[in-house]
Amino acid sequence: MENIEETAVVIVGAGPAGLAVSACLSLKSIPYILLEKEDCVAPLWKKHAYDRLHLHLAKNYCFLPFKPHSPSTPTYLSKDEFIQYIDDYVSDFDIKPRLSCCVECALYLEDERNWNILVKNYASNGIEIYRAQFLVIASGENAKGFIPEIEGLSEFKGQVIHSSEYKSGLEFHGKNVLVIGCGNSGMELAYDLANYGARTSIVIRSPFHVVSRELIRLGMFLLKYFPINVVDSLVTFGAKTMFGDLSKYGIHRPKEGPFFLKATKGRSPVIDVGTVSKIKTREIKVLPAVSSIKEDIVVFENGQRQAFDAIILATGFRSTACDWLEDYCYVLNDQGFPKNRYPLHWKGEKGVYCVGLSKMGLFGVSSDAEQTANDIAKLLHAETDNSKGKYN
Ligand SMILES: Cc1cc2nc3c(=O)[nH]c(=O)nc-3n(C[C@H](O)[C@H](O)[C@H](O)COP(=O)(O)OP(=O)(O)OC[C@H]3O[C@@H](n4cnc5c(N)ncnc54)[C@H](O)[C@@H]3O)c2cc1C
Ligand SMILES: NC(=O)C1=CN([C@@H]2O[C@H](COP(=O)(O)OP(=O)(O)OC[C@H]3O[C@@H](n4cnc5c(N)ncnc54)[C@H](OP(=O)(O)O)[C@@H]3O)[C@@H](O)[C@H]2O)C=CC1
Ligand SMILES: O=C(O)C(=O)Cc1c[nH]c2ccccc12
């Protein structure tokens, strides 16, 4: 029994979401334990993001609770500036995450009315058990890279990496590289590869919106005053004027608008960083879906075949919360996202909360964290009348 540590709240994941909840709880003097499986905070940003990354949204949409960005930072922060902000956040709020602690199982015991959390400590190689009244799922929408099933992929003769392992195009100079996936990662990695002198191709298999970051900024502002369909029409008109008809290059726009798709399906518009002009000049070649791979040859759905030295899978990410949360179905769907629809997504039953799973970026992270901490504080205060000082 003595090796079970008790606290009010256990938070799984020390990315921006876990850190934001920690800060909010700490300001309310609510005890918590923050568990992170990797050896640093915000590893998505520190270890799994490419060098040239800048935030796509202006800084007034990308801050955590109680710490707006300094006026001296640029409107669109670089990866390093955002990491500095995160590190400052950790010291400002005196957050002490337990690193290299991977949550393997979280189970709610009805008779105890507590969460029991089983943790593998990679540093000590031991197993630890925590007990808490509240559990916060802050393990992220991007917990693992998604590797699609493509016939022959595992036998491909060249290098295969996921976008989360890509740093820069330096090592690909002069090579034939295929980027599979045309979300924000794929489009930006293709641009970076071409800049470094790689012969670059990108697979585009579905329609998507290409916009500029200024159009998205304008759209975010207009959404405060106008309905989504009006803003979508304006932004789409702006994007068509800016980029022209891209259908002859294999880029088609969906029927639904960019903000509508973000709000309903979580699909982000692609914010162009210069890829489109490289596609127009054919410096980046657009190819259709892959049907199979044989040795170093990739066969495409139109029958075309081409040899490549490397494949970058910019095929997105998956939530892994269902892997460690027992009986997840009362709070999560099978994809590891909240079962309740926005704006009620953040609260589950039995004292479990979802922070950062609303597909609303850092803006959503902050709002979920504040609502979660407020709710926990309310429930604890209601309780203190009956049993005082349980955690102090
Ligand atoms: C390349 C890239 C760029 C992005 N740029 C922007 C942007 O400009 N603006 C924006 O708003 N959003 C952006 N996003 C979205 C971004 O994911 C979020 O804004 C932000 O990182 C989410 O924070 P999070 O804490 O929810 O998730 P994460 O940062 O993924 O943190 C989750 C943490 O949980 C840990 N974890 C997972 N499972 C366990 C476990 N079982 N036990 C212990 N720990 C665990 C992980 O190691 C991770 O550290 C970007 C995403 C990517 C991939
Ligand atoms: N600077 C920034 O702020 C950045 C932000 N981000 C954000 O991070 C999140 C993740 O982005 P990203 O990594 O691009 O992932 P996404 O999930 O947004 O995109 C994945 C892409 O891979 C495609 N894909 C998946 N499987 C296959 C397959 N078998 N064959 C061909 N294509 C396939 C998808 O196409 P389909 O639709 O057909 O399935 C889609 O185009 C997003 O929210 C994004 O906006 C990412 C990079 C930079
Ligand atoms: O980078 C992303 O994909 C994000 O999730 C940030 C984001 C939140 N809301 C948006 C609306 C349009 C474009 C990006 C985002």
Image (spheres, grey):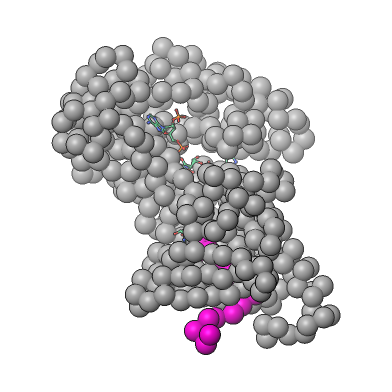
Q: Quadrant of residue 160?
A: top left
**Of the pair 141 and 246, the residue shown nearer to us:** 141
Compared to residue 294, the image places residue 315 above or below, namely below
Which x, y percent locates residue 253? 52, 20
Compared to residue 392, the image places residue 84 above or below, namely above
- Position of 249 with respect to 308 (left or right) is right
Compared to residue 148, the image places residue 113 above or below, namely below
Residue 81, visible in the rendered structure: no
Principal SS element in the magenta part?
Answer: strand
- Judge whether residue 196 is colored magenta: no
Q: Residue at x 42, y 59 (%)?
A: 43
Q: Residue at x 56, y 65 (%)?
A: 107
- Position of 323 with respect to 365 (left or right) is left
Which x, y percent locates residue 363? 62, 49
Q: Find ligand 3 in the image and state its quadrant.
A: top right
**Of the pair 47 and 296, the residue shown nearer to us:** 296
Residue 276, visible in the rendered structure: yes
Q: Residue at x 49, y 84 (%)?
A: 3
Magenta stretch: give its range. Answer: 1-14
